[in-house]
Amino acid sequence: MKISLKLIFTLLLAILFLVGASVLLSRYFEQYTSEFIDHDIYSEYLSEERRVFVRLPKGYDSQKSYPLIIKSDGNFNLSRWHETVATQSEKKLIEDSIIVAIPNLFWVDTRNRDLVPPYARKDVQIEARPSTENSPEIFGKADLFLSFIEKELIPFIENEYSINDNRVLSGFSAGGSFVLYTIVTKPELFTGYFAFSPAAWYDKSVVVSEFKNGLNKVAGKPLFLYLSLGGAENEIITGSFKGLLSAIDSNAPKNFHSVHSYSEGAGHVDNPFISVPLALEAYYKFRADKI
């Protein structure tokens, strides 16, 4: 029995389609679902539905109130956060907390759009973007994402779960730049801010200069910032990181407390994994001393 080339070609296409669909489905479940509780929230500010992953403390009791940790990096290191919070709270080093992780949209690349500050819209990669991809519509809308968090996500969490005023915002890379943007835009929204390997180098380190100029806005209640950098990260990121430390030294008010660390030998992606337990321990030491 002869098999036509057309049939072979059709079968090959079908196989490729099934393999592609399987890979896509696997990525969907990996990136856009979690081992915890998933909620979908429609955002008027973003004009889209956003998913969040909610990790509850062991033995969660709605009659008690818990600290809140919001992380802007979805499933990235979410297991690390869960295991660290569980372990450290069992040791009484920190309080067990509700963790809310926000993934990027799956079908659309929204990370740079959501996390890059409005004043950093040009070159959001080490290599400049092509002019055809250099539109403010693609990125630089952290102001809208912050409104989503402040006016839609947090009220939703307050309505669904029992949280207290101990609140942390954490982000990695572009998420780190969002943390820096938030702390000088809405400093009262959180008591702790963690920025791991922050992408503060956009547009000749405009994030650094805006952070420096905005530090006078954080006068008031005690605030905490944890900054970390991998020891093996590139010179551009390292230079902007040093700029952030200099800005804190020169412009930070007395109520502003910061800790920084270098993860020896760690690259950009490795540093957050190392930083999570260090940041939490430093934050709770700050709370014991200042709050």
Image (cartoon, grey):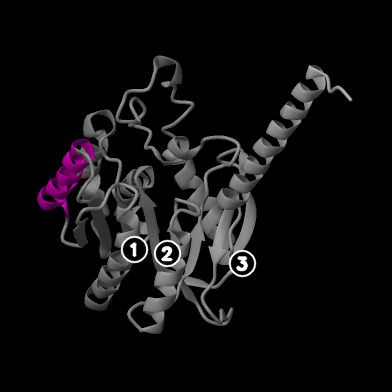
Front tag of 3 and 2:
2
Name which residue lies at 20% across and 58% down.
260
Q: CA distance from mark 3 to mark 2?
A: 24 Å
> Which quadrant of the rendered structure holds the C terminus?
bottom left
Dominant secondary structure (helix, strand or loop) of the stretch shown in magenta: helix
Q: Return the x and y of residue 31 as percentages of the image width and height.
A: 56, 49
Do callouts 2 and 1 mark residues in contact (Cβ within 8 Å)?
yes
- The vertical placement of 12 against 26, above or below, is above
Name the amino acid type tagged 2.
Answer: Arg
Residue drawn at (24%, 43%) of the image: 211
Name which residue type carries label 3.
Answer: Glu
Distance Cα–Cα, label 2 vs label 1: 8 Å
Q: Nearer the viewer, mark 2 or mark 1?
A: 2
Label 3 crowding class (10 Å Cα cut-off): few <14, some 14-19, many 20+?
Answer: few
247 vs 89: above or below: above
Q: Contact (CB < 8 A) between labels 3 and 1?
A: no
Residue at the top extreme?
Answer: 131
Say which element carries label 3: helix
Magenta stretch? 235-252
Tell whether label 2 touches label 3 (CB within 8 Å): no
The residue wearing badge 2 is 80
Residue 177 vs residue 259: left or right? right
Residue 160: assigned label: 3
Which residue, given by chain and number where applicable, does mark 1 sit on?
276
The vertical placement of 21 against 131, above or below, is: below
